[in-house]
Amino acid sequence: MSSTARLRLKKPPESVTVQAVTDILGPLDSGILAAILDTGASLEEIRRAAVWLDENHYTQATADRPMSQKMRRVYEILDYARSRFE
């Protein structure tokens, strides 16, 4: 298969929009939402951070792969938001 054909088969990355993030995380305070968007994390990184936070089990030793810096920042923002509103 030529490299041109392979490029066409790749799925384009999902756009990280306010709507896409709120679809994943639900309604958020505008400051929290802005902080998450400012991380530059992909939607997949945002999803994974939310899952790890919801399951409350993330550790470097047990994760299937380590968190990227962007994912870690989203995780920290979500953890802060959760503690702030509990």
Image (tube, rainbow, N blue to C red):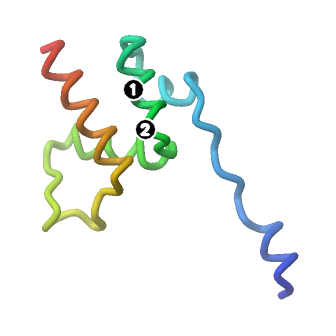
Q: In this view, does 44 lie above or below 27?
A: below
Give SS at disc 1: helix
Q: In which quarter of the image is the N terminus?
A: bottom right
The span from disc 2 to disc 1 (Cα, nearest Å) is: 7 Å
Residue drawn at the location 70% of the way across and 58% of the way down? 11
Residue 34 vs residue 26, the one in the foreground: 34
Name the amino acid type tagged 1.
Ala
- Determine crowd level at label 1: few under 14, some 14-19, many 20+ residues with C-alpha closer than 10 A: some
> Which residue: 44% across, 22% down?
34
The percent coordinates of residue 76 (x first, y second) are 23, 37
The residue where tag 2 is placed is 39
**Which percent across, then down, holds residue 44?**
47, 48
Closer to the camera in the image, 58 or 34: 34
Badge 2 crowding class, 10 Å Cα cut-off, few under 14, some 14 to 19, many 20 or more, is: some
Q: Is 82 placed above or below 75 here? A: above
Q: Viewed as shown, does residue 41 lie left or right of 31?
A: right
Q: Name the residue: 12% across, 15% down.
A: 86
Residue type of the residue flagged with mark 2 = Thr
For residue 35, the mark is 1
Q: Which of 35 and 27 is in front in this view?
A: 35
State the image quarter where residue 77 is shown.
top left
Q: Are marks 2 and 1 in contact (CB under 8 Å)?
A: yes
The residue at 46%/44% (across/down) is 41
Image vertical order of residue 6 relative to residue 45, above or below: below
**Does 32 sit left or right of 37 as displayed?**
left
